[in-house]
Amino acid sequence: MAKKNNSCNHSCFMCKHVLKEWWEVIELRRKNISVRKGQQFIYENSEVTGVYFVQEGLVKIHKKWGDKETIIRFAAKDDMIGFRGINTEDTLYPISATALEKTSLCFIEIDFFKSLLKVNPSFTYELMMFLADELYLSEIKRGNMVHLPAKSRIAWCLLRLIKLFGVDEEGKINITINKTDLASYAGTTYETCYRILSELTADQLILQKDKTIIIKNYDQLSEISKNLNSN
């Protein structure tokens, strides 16, 4: 599954922030991994081996809470995966990762990754800021789960997908996501997600087309995402 690949364009989070003198060493140490749609490549509570950078494709990062799966975030081109396993308390991944489409990954072993951090202060600083942003978003999402009704959570998740992936000229979010994964991301059931998307469609705030969603009224969707009393 893993093989060397000499086609790195140095656009990922790591290569953008390390000293260019390290690019050649990274080329020698990295591995390219191809995963098919639906294939899981990080398993929750498995030993931390390294971090991954998405070269092409889309990945969901998810976690089990009892018998329920929650999608924590999505990772697309140039994003980093596996950083939640970098800590001093444990050597196990606290999350799982599964490809949502055919995906190409760059894998860096954990010891080499830590070495890069020690000799690249700019990279270390940027990683610290990245982790701070991730912690901030995690706290917001956790607060939403406790305080916001399902309709507001789904609206917030749609806005977050817009932030992550953008929209095309007709307002279509640039990600193909099924209702099961959207429900998991919003922390609700498939049935509730289906009903709320139908309501948003009937109110002409969104338009559903195959597995894509077109945003018709961004401002109203934003208002719903903050509404503690949404049905």
Image (spheres, rainbow, N blue to C red):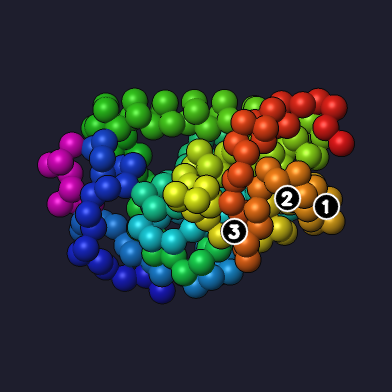
Foreground of the two, 197 or 94? 197
Q: Would residue 8 be seen by someone viewing this image from the given angle?
A: yes
Residue at the (29%, 57%) spot, across then down: 30
Region in magenta: 19-26
**Label 3: element kind:** strand
Mark nearer the N terminus (3 vs 1)? 1
Amino acid found under the numbered disc labelled 1: Arg
Q: Is residue 117 above or below residue 166?
A: above
Residue tagged 3: 212
Residue tagged 1: 195
Mark nearer the N terminus (3 vs 2)? 2
Q: Quadrant of residue 114?
A: top left
For the residues marked 3 and 2, what is the alpha-carbon distance in whole angstroms?
Answer: 13 Å
Amino acid found under the numbered disc labelled 3: Thr
Q: Are marks 3 and 1 in contact (CB under 8 Å)?
A: no
User: Residue 64's spot in the image, x, y percent?
Assistant: 73, 51
> In the rendered structure, does residue 209 fall within the stretch colored magenta?
no
Q: Is residue 189 above or below residue 87?
A: below
Q: Are marks 3 and 2 in contact (CB under 8 Å)?
A: no
Q: Would residue 73 be seen by someone viewing this image from the given angle?
A: no
Amino acid found under the numbered disc labelled 2: Thr
Residue at the (37%, 70%) spot, across then down: 2
**Label 2: element kind:** helix
Dot 3, crowdedness within 10 Å: few (<14), some or many (≥20)?
A: some
Q: Which mark is residue 201?
A: 2
User: Residue 122's spot in the image, x, y percent?
Assistant: 27, 28
Q: Is residue 24 left or right of residue 112?
A: left
Q: Is residue 20 left or right of residue 164?
A: left
